[in-house]
Image (tube, rainbow, N blue to C red):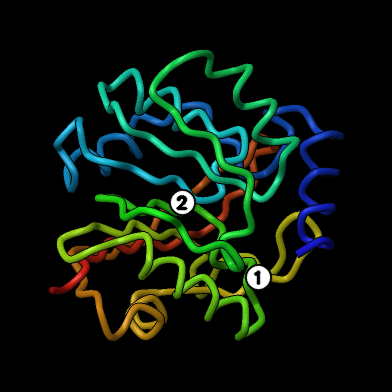
Amino acid sequence: MTDRRAHWDTVYAEKAEDAVSWFEADARDRVALIARHVPDRAAALLDVGSGRTRLIPALVAAGYRDVTALDISAEAVARAKVGTGVGPVAWVVADIAERTPDRAYALWHDRAVLHFLTEAADRDGYRRALLAGTEPGSVAILSAFAPDGPTMCSGLPVRRYGQAEFEAFLWPGFTTRESFPALHRTPGGAEQRFHVHVAWRLP
């Protein structure tokens, strides 16, 4: 965990918000996806790997009143707090591969953490956290580089996912609600192919 944390602290300390490849200036599409599956504004939401994403303030602006932002990097969380201001947000610094949530959430959202976990032990830790942090009826929205997407990000290798890979990772315990490819354009103009998977926690 120490090496991972040091890596991400360095990234967020040295790079501007819009200088990282995963920067997304407009979070409206992601908020719409979340709202479609979890419309209750009082529902508890967890954003894993929140970084300095603009999703958190966008969720607050959309009326969500119980939002938890989790990231491995204390540097990212500190900077995100300044950008977001006050609001119904709990800020957590933790490695999700090693941290078990102490409550269940109606939504588990991960835009691009899982694909960095290339070791089986880390994926097992993530899955334990996912099961502890959800309950029957909870929704998990996971995004990762697609099978035809990049093999590296931020100098690190990644594990790529399509619908079949997500379903294998989530089985048993979850059933697919929707699964689709997505295209992200980096601030530098490059195109990155992602896959987005939405699943429901079974009783």
Nearer to us in this view, 109 or 181 = 109
Q: Is mark 1 on a helix, strand or loop?
A: loop
Q: Residue 11 in the image: x percent, y percent? A: 80, 43
Give the residue displayed 41% in from the left and 63% down from the top: 195
Which residue position is annotated with label 2?
183
Q: How many labels does the image show?
A: 2
In the image, residue 58 sits, relative to residue 148, either above or below, namely above
Give the residue displayed 63% in from the left and 58% down from the top: 95
Q: Which amino acid does label 2 sit on?
A: Leu
Marks 1 and 2: which is nearer the front? Answer: 1
Give the residue displayed 52% in from the left and 81% down from the top: 124
Residue neighbourhood size for the residue with mark 2, other residues' Cα within 10 Å, grouped as few (<14), some (14–19), many (≥20): few
Quarter of the image containing the C terminus?
Answer: bottom left
In the image, residue 9 sits, relative to residue 84, either above or below, namely below
Nearer to us in this view, 151 or 60 = 60
Give the residue displayed 25% in from the left and 36% down from the top: 32
- The quadrant holding residue 141 is bottom left
Quarter of the image containing the N terminus?
Answer: bottom right
Q: What element carries label 2?
A: strand
Q: Residue 45 in the image: x percent, y percent? A: 33, 42
First in sequence, mark 1 or 2: give its number: 1
Q: Residue 138 in the image: x percent, y percent? A: 22, 58
Q: Which amino acid does label 1 sit on?
A: Val
Please give the label number shown on residue 158. Answer: 1
